[in-house]
Image (cartoon, rainbow, N blue to C red):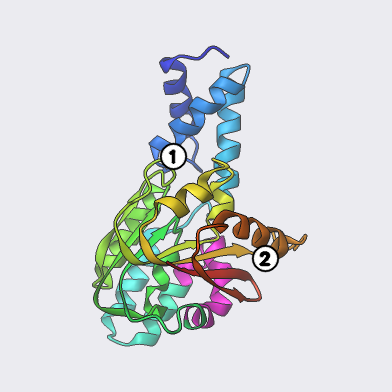
C-alpha cells in the first residue's frame, strides 16, 4: 500500500492498544510497521503482520500476565533474609515466567560453570535481547563491583530488571531498546546472546551478523535452542550450528562448543 506517516502512526497505536504488545519498545514497532506497510495491501493486513513478527521474535516467550510487582516483592523479601539460597529460589521463580529462561533453569548452574570456566572474574557483562536472564547473575563469576547492562524490547520487563539490579547491588542498567537498530557499543568483558539470534533474525535476516560485528566484547557467549517451543527437535542443533559457523567464518575467533540437554552454546573469544 502507498502508506504515509499517518498510517504508521495508526499502526503503532493499534499495536500499542494490544495487551500483549503495549509494552514493546515503540521504535521497534514503528520499524517493523514501516516495513509491513510497504508490503501489505491494507493497514489492517500490516497491523496483523507486525503483530505476527513481534510474536515470532519475542511474544511467544513471555507469559501474558507476568506479575512483576509480585516477583519483585518476593525478591526483596528473600534479600532481606541475607541468605543466598532464598534469593536464588526467588530469582528462579521469576525466571520461570519467561519461556527461554525457564528452559535453562534445570541446567543453570552447569551452564555458566561450564561455559565460563577459566574466565577471570567478569567486571562487565552485556546481555542483549536478555529476557529475564539478568536474574541469573548470582550464578555468574562476577568480580566485586561488576556492572551488568541488560537490553530487551519490553519496557515493563526492563523496568523490573532495573529494580532487580538495584536490589542486587549491581551497577549498570536495564533499558528497553531496539537492539538491532541501536545495539549498545560499550566495551565489556562478556556479552551474552542467549537464544537471541534466531529471534532477532525473524525481524531482520542480517541481525545475527550485524550484532556479532557491532558488539564490543572480549568474549561472547552465544546460544541456540535445541528444540522448538512445542518440544520438537527437527534437526535444530545441526541447523543452528551450521548457521553459526557461517556467521563467524573468516573472523579468526577462538570458539568453544558446549552441548546441553536444552541448549547449544558457543564461547567466542577475540
Q: Can you give x and y, in whole percent of width and height, for residue 68 in the image?
A: 39, 59
Report the front residue among 35 and 96. 35
The residue at 58%/42% (across/down) is 205
Residue 166, compared with residue 197, is above or below; it is below
Residue range corresponding to the magenta coloring: 93-112
Left or right: 251 as drawn, with respect to 152: right
Left or right: 97 as drawn, with respect to 71: right
The residue at 48%/41% (across/down) is 21
Q: Which residue is mark 2?
A: 226
User: Tag on residue 22?
Assistant: 1
Report the front residue among 26 and 81. 26
- Density class for disc 1 (Cα within 10 Å; few <14, some 14-19, many ≥20) is some
Q: Can you give x and y, in whole percent of width and height, for residue 138 in the image?
A: 37, 78
> Distance from label 2 to label 1 (Cα)?
30 Å
Q: From the viewer's perspective, is the residue at label 2 or at label 1 nearer? A: 2
The residue at 40%/41% (across/down) is 25
Q: Is residue 241 magenta?
A: no
The quarter of the picture where the C terminus appears is bottom left
Quadrant in the picture for residue 84 = bottom left
The quarter of the picture where the N terminus appears is top right
Residue 174, compared with residue 267, is above or below; it is above
Report the front residue among 200 and 131. 200
Quadrant in the picture for residue 250 = bottom right
The residue at 56%/20% (across/down) is 38
Residue 225, compared with residue 34, is above or below; it is below
Amino acid at each position: 500500500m502507498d502508506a504515509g506517516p499517518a498510517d504508521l502512526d495508526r499502526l503503532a497505536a493499534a499495536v500499542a492498544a494490544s495487551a500483549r504488545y503495549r509494552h514493546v519498545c515503540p521504535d521497534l514497532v514503528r520499524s517493523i510497521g514501516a516495513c509491513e506497510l510497504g508490503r501489505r495491501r491494507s493497514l489492517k493486513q500490516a497491523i496483523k503482520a507486525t503483530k505476527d513478527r513481534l510474536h515470532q521474535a519475542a511474544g511467544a516467550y513471555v507469559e501474558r500476565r507476568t506479575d512483576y510487582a509480585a516477583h519483585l516483592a518476593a525478591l526483596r523479601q528473600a534479600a532481606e533474609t541475607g541468605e543466598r539460597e532464598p534469593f536464588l529460589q526467588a530469582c528462579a521463580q521469576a525466571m520461570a515466567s519467561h519461556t527461554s529462561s525457564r528452559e535453562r533453569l534445570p541446567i543453570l548452574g552447569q551452564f555458566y560453570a561450564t561455559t565460563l570456566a577459566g574466565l577471570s572474574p567478569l567486571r562487565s557483562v552485556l546481555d542483549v535481547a536478555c529476557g529475564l536472564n539478568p536474574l541469573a547473575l548470582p550464578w555468574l563469576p562476577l568480580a566485586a563491583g561488576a556492572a551488568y547492562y541488560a537490553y530487551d524490547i519490553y519496557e515493563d520487563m526492563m523496568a523490573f530488571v532495573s529494580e532487580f539490579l538495584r536490589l542486587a547491588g549491581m551497577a549498570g542498567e536495564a533499558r528497553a531498546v531496539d537492539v538491532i537498530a541501536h545495539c549498545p557499543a560499550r566495551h565489556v568483558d562478556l556479552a551474552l546472546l542467549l537464544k537471541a539470534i534466531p529471534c532477532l533474525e525473524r525481524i531482520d535476516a542480517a541481525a545475527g551478523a550485524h550484532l556479532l560485528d557491532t558488539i564490543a566484547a572480549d568474549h561472547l557467549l552465544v546460544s541456540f535452542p535445541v528444540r522448538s517451543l512445542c518440544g520438537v527437535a527437527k534437526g535444530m542443533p545441526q541447523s543452528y550450528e551450521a548457521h553459526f559457523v557461517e556467521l563467524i567464518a573468516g573472523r579468526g575467533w577462538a570458539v568453544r562448543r558446549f552441548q546441553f540437554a536444552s541448549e547449544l552454546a558457543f564461547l567466542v573469544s577475540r
